[in-house]
Image: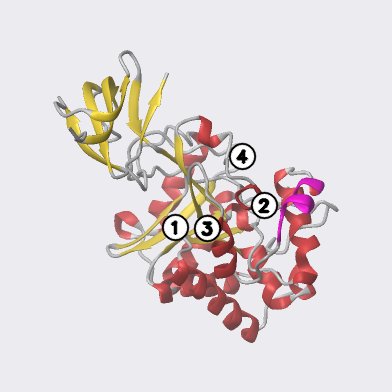
Amino acid sequence: MPHAYDLVIRNGLVVDGSGAERFEADVAVAGGRIAAVGAVSGRGAEEIDAKGKLVTPGFVDIHTHYDGQAVWSDRLSPSSSHGVTTVVGGNCGVGFAPCRPEHHDLLVSVMEGVEDIPEVVMTEGLSWDWETYPEYLNAIEQRPHDIDFASQIPHSAVRVYVMGQRGADREPASADDLNKMQAVVREAMEVGALGFATSRLIIHKTGQGDPIPTWMAAEGELEAMALALKGAGKGVLQAVFGAPGRTFEDEIDLLYRAMRSSRWRAWGGGSTSSIRSATRRTTSQRPRNRSLRGRGPPASQPRSSPTTYCSRTAGGGSCSPRWPTTAASRLTPSMLC
């Protein structure tokens, strides 16, 4: 007799991510999707007794730097060893696409300095069988992975791709430069990027100790990137702030102005004062702040400076100066000891 399900996890303590109390139940999976939760009578081709263990939706780690590891390894560890089923790369505006051959070493140096990943590991591991962002995603898709990988298009890579050494040297972008960068970002969104990421953090430097290409990028440049997301009709804008001589509140005001100029709307009416108020609460109580939307635990982010996420959805936009919560992008359950 054929089995009703591919997998049944029995007798586990289910925490479903809704904020409801945990409850004991069986979880049945068929075709890679959760098919039933409760008292499951049908048998599974595989069965696991999860008595005394937690069963949860897969965790989504929204701030990772697996941009290189996803190229050379099918295991995105350690995240995949801890109940994470989806990781997001491209954060802090650093990554490896788009990239022309003459800039390989530069983007490796940026990642080395920002994330302390040894240069030799990246030099040996990166295949560089791409130039554009769509080609990078195709290269990632060619290798099977133990968990899902999603990506944001990184500002440093976009800036250098369009401006060359001028971008690396942090020269102001011309109107033509901005138009070309917008086209690159729109193309990335069309092929599956989750959004656009940047950094203005002073401690983010290259392996040689130079400021990264996006440090102190002009307000008009950030506005242009926000407009590119608006043109795509979707996407988040992730930013890491910490420019010298500027408070985090100053930086939030900058991002808010970019939102207004691109006609994104903030939650709660979109007033600057409401964002400032949320910022003050957030910087003193980052993981515990409940005043903004979202429930559940914040995503892991091992940085002392807050990260801000802005997004555009069908219902408007949001600017959340905190570690945001997120729902799993697929329904694969995780069993935790």
Q: Are marks 1 and 4 in contact (CB under 8 Å)?
A: no
Q: Amino acid at mark 2?
A: Leu
Q: Which residue is mark 1?
A: 310
Is residue 207 placed above or below 51 in the rendered structure?
Answer: below
Q: Which residue is label 4 attached to?
A: 303
Give x and y (percent) for residue 306: 55, 44
- Is residue 121 on the magenta stretch? yes
- According to the image, label 3 marks what residue? 141
Instruction: Check disc 3 and report its element: helix, strand or loop.
Output: helix
Q: Are marks 1 and 3 in contact (CB under 8 Å)?
A: no
Main SS of residues in magenta: helix
Which mark, by number, is residue 201? 2
Q: Is residue 49 above or below residue 267?
A: above
Alpha-carbon span between mark 3 and mark 2? 31 Å
Residue 31 covered by magenta stretch? no
Compute the Cα span from label 1 to label 4: 18 Å
